[in-house]
Amino acid sequence: MKVDRRARFAGALALCAALAWPLAARDVYRGFLDPGNPQHRATLDLLERLEKTPNDASLHNDLACLIARDGFWRDALREFGVAAKLDKADSRPLYNAGLVHAMRGEWGSAASSFRKAVSRGPGNWAGWWMLGFAEEQRGNEGAAIAAYKTSLRVDTSLFDVRRNPFAARTRLKGRVLLESLDARVYRLALPAAEQMAQPDLVTSFQHGHVAVLAVSGAPVPAGAPVPEDRAAKLGPGGPVITSVPPVGMSRPAPPPGSSVSARPAIPTVTRANEPIPSDFPEQSPAGPVPPRRVQPGQGGEEDAPAPVPTPTPRPPGPGVG
């Protein structure tokens, strides 16, 4: 009887200890924060902001990132979980949680977190790459290659160690790049081969969504905004833009009273409406072209160099035989 009571008492103590341990381990990082450390000052700032807005998912995510840098994995994972629950459309907390598991070598949990991250955000290309890396570490080469290929839909920079330190440890880079070569070549060829109704659609957004017209004075497309600082006039086909220099290519006018003489306007685009590179020299290194003169009576034919005058002979001076 006494043995049963002792066993029950020991079990109750063990249960209480198991329940109290996570509570005691919560927010362990707080005792190690040093206000003199810039990273810890940022952590303290986030804690103050969370007291005012405790349901801000982005603050919980960023706090967890800072905590993870100091190695407090349990606290970081808990904060990532809170952020993922508060904002169910954000893939970043789950991706960051996958990184924590990867740092600890927990590749099963890492793959699960990365898979949930790309499920929320299919455009999280880093998440697809890390999912492939986690599956590669687990020995699932088929799943790894499929995830790697998905990450290459934009570019191949995720296999560059300078951008992604994990790229130094993958053994499937050559195989993935080779198997995805045809698909990547076809995607790169599309912009040059496709036939669009508005070929300059992307260019217009790069220039602040301003219509860059191929012909000066052509009608402005319907709905295209006309900047207030650009000259516009009314033409036969409606309002037209007389000049739209590309962003960052215009030259500022000299200040009033400056001694700098006015210079003729330098075109920013070629006759084919292609932007002139900013480093293109304004004048040939050989200098300006010498002026050409037209021979009398030759009209508009090919110009010939001006004749060199023959020096007039001087009469002999005194004492010359």
Image: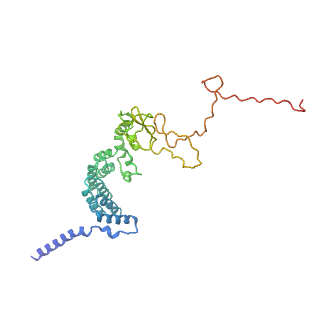
Q: Residue furthest bottom?
A: 2
171, above or below 243, in the image: below
Rendered position, 283 above or below 139: above
39 vs 320, nearest the viewer: 320
Image position, residue 137 (x, y; %): 31, 52
Residue furthest toward the top? 297
Q: Please tell me which residue lies in front, 234 or 13.
A: 234
Tell me: residue 302, above or below residue 32. Answer: above
Q: Is residue 127 left or right of residue 253?
A: left
Which quadrant is the N terminus positioned in?
Answer: bottom left
x then y, percent, for residue 288: 61, 37
Quarter of the image where one finds residue 227: top left
Q: Is residue 251 left or right of residue 13?
A: right
Check the picture and name the quadrant holding the C terminus: top right
Q: Is residue 48 above or below residue 106?
A: below
Q: Please say which color scheme the image uses.
A: rainbow
Residue at the far left in the pictured view: 1
Residue 5 placement, left or right of 280: left
Pinpoint residue 18: horizontal percent, then vertical percent: 21, 68
Instruction: Kindly identify the residue that appears in the image at 22 percent across and 70 percent down.
Output: 20
Count how many numbered circles sit on residues in the image.
0
Which image quadrant for residue 145? top left
| Residue 64 position within the rendered picture, expressed as x and y whole percent measured from the top left | 31, 61
